[in-house]
Amino acid sequence: MPKIISYQKGKGIKRMTSMRVVKRFRWSMAHRLIHGYKGPCASLHGHEYEVEVTVTGEMDAVGMAVDFADIKRTCLGWIKEHLDHTTIVCESDTALLDFLQRENQRHYVVDFNTTAENLAIHLREVLQKELNRELDRPLSVTHIRLLETPSSWVEVP
Ligand SMILES: [Zn+2]
């Protein structure tokens, strides 16, 4: 891991260590693929999704880059509020969207086909925004691994 040595007036030499901190979260969600996709995932179905979020920050005087509990509160909080036990639906899938609205079903509307790849990119964006909003230290979401099943996943570097 890279070590940056800096000099701070009155504090002498300070070693700053960049650290990657990783948390995993799970949730249940339904989806289907559109835009001409012909495989089995064109039918509405569900997954027990799992995401591994890697957050990079500088270690502080306590010896922490970020508290695991803060990542959990921020990231899992957002996932539970927006995704857990919902159907994720593309705004152009009007038949499914109409059904979800008419039946008052929990749903989360996006502007992309709900592939694992697109969802992983979306999660990186929204979780970065949540960390910026909730925590008062500079942190970057530097890696996302999103699993649709225990043996199938995508990664956003
Ligand atoms: Zn699927």
Image (tube, rainbow, N blue to C red):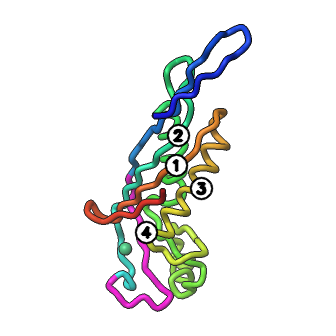
Q: Label 2 belongs to which residue?
A: 56
Residue visible at 43% across and 79% down?
Answer: 32
Q: Label 3 belongs to which residue?
A: 126
Could you tell me the amino acid type at mark 4?
Ala
Q: Given contact means CB atoms under 8 Å apart, are the residues at marks 3 and 2 in contact? A: no
Q: Is residue 84 visible?
A: yes
> Picture quarter containing residue 131?
top right
Question: Closer to the N terminus: mark 3 or mark 2?
Answer: 2
Could you tell me the amino acid type at mark 2?
Thr
Could you tell me the amino acid type at mark 3?
Val
Residue 121 locus on image (x, y percent): 53, 63
Depth order, front residue of 11/4: 4
Depth order, front residue of 146/31: 146
Question: Closer to the N terminus: mark 1 or mark 4?
Answer: 4
> Looking at mark 1, is its residue's CB closer than 8 Å to ligand 1?
no
Q: Label 1 belongs to which residue?
A: 142
Q: Nearer the viewer, mark 1 or mark 3?
A: 1
Q: Is residue 93 above or below residue 18?
A: below
Residue 29 locus on image (x, y percent): 41, 65
Is residue 39 found inside the magenta-colored segment of the image?
yes
